Amino acid sequence: MVDYKELADAVVTGNLKSVTSIVDKALNVEKRPPVEIVEKGLAPGMNAIGERYAKGEAFLVDVIVASNAFKRAMESIKPHFRTNTKKRGTAVMGTVEGDIHDLGKNLVCIALEVNGFNVIDLGNDVKPSAFSSATRLNKAEVVGMSTLITTTMVNLKNVIDQLIEDGVRSSVKVICGGAPVDKEYVLRIGGDLYGRDAFEGAEVVKKTLGPSQKARD
Ligand code: B12
């Protein structure tokens, strides 16, 4: 039986060989659901290295090494998510300006994709103008933003303000997430939706847009 504690520990130490072999066993031998592997092994590993870093027991380089192991594991896991072929619309996603954290944002992209959305991933450190022009050019129905740093939370609102200024705010649902953000904050800055995690976020978006939203192109 796959040991998720062992997987989390392998993420913490950035042991690529161990991460790859445990994930491979979970996926291909035990046929474990991809979400389970993320939620029970990989994410707890990232939280553990985060706690060590916060206590001064790990350096930034240790966090980078753990992040690389997480990313490598996600590359193996991504093809195993069963994608819903129903076309639900287009979502523009990014981590806001000033913030380079992208593991959570990448998970949200996957969660939206497997739920039938066409995802335009703008990456990290994304300027408000880039969110807005991608929304307009792709006739997106959803704008999703991530931030993990308290000092860049303000940039969530800057994106919303830019969407208003460019006349596209009313045509999209805005969803925000990331550790320092909560639902109350999102509503206060003029957003629509919040998700505690990637898959909750995708569910909330799906519920809000309805079952048969068609992609416009
Ligand atoms: C990994 C990591 C890094 C990596 C990032 C690698 C990468 N490619 O992303 C590196 C080493 C580069 C890094 C750098 C820094 N980091 Co850092 N980092 C972390 C760490 C340990 C884990 C974050 C993570 O990836 N978790 C795993 C993912 C899967 O979870 P997640 O991002 O939280 O996403 C989940 C939810 O939040 C949600 N979600 C996220 N976004 C969205 C969006 C939507 C729409 C929805 C619905 C849901 C959603 O869904 C995901 C789960 O399904 C956290 C600590 C922690 N415990 O969070 C610190 C942390 C976020 N970092 C921190 C800091 C300070 C920094 C630096 C400023 C450090 C420095 N001195 O340089 C720099 C940032 C520089 C910059 N300008 O951005 C602080 C932030 C403090 C604060 N409150 O402001 C933290 C909290 C560490 C700490 N305790 O001090 N970091």
Image: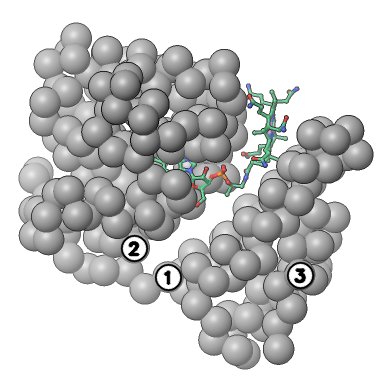
* Mark sitting on residue 114: 2
**Callout 3: SS:** helix
| Image vertical order of residue 71 relative to residue 157, above or below | below
Q: Is 139 on the left-hand or right-hand side of 82?
A: left
User: Are there few (<14), some (14-19), or many (20+) residues within 10 Å of tag 2?
Assistant: many
Q: Are marks 2 and 1 in contact (CB under 8 Å)?
A: yes
Q: Which mark is residue 5?
A: 3
Q: Is mark 3 within 8 Å of ligand 1?
A: no
Q: Position of residue 111 (x, y in %)?
A: 39, 57
Tag 2 secondary structure = helix
- Give me the residue at 9% from left, 43% from top: 217
Q: CA distance from mark 3 to mark 1?
A: 22 Å
Instruction: Tell whether circle 2 marks a residue whose Cβ is less than 8 angstroms from ligand 1.
Output: no
Q: Give how far apart the Cα atoms at labels 3 and 2 are.
A: 26 Å
Q: Kindly identify the residue that appears in the image at 25 percent across and 60 percent down.
A: 116
- Pair 3/2: label in front: 3
Position of residue 44 measured from the top left corner of the image (x, y, whole percent): 68, 57
Which residue is identified by label 1? 81
User: Ligand 1 is found in which quarter of the picture?
Assistant: top right
Please name the amino acid that badge 1 sits on: Phe
Q: Quadrant of residue 189?
A: top left
- Precedes in sequence: disc 3 or disc 2: 3
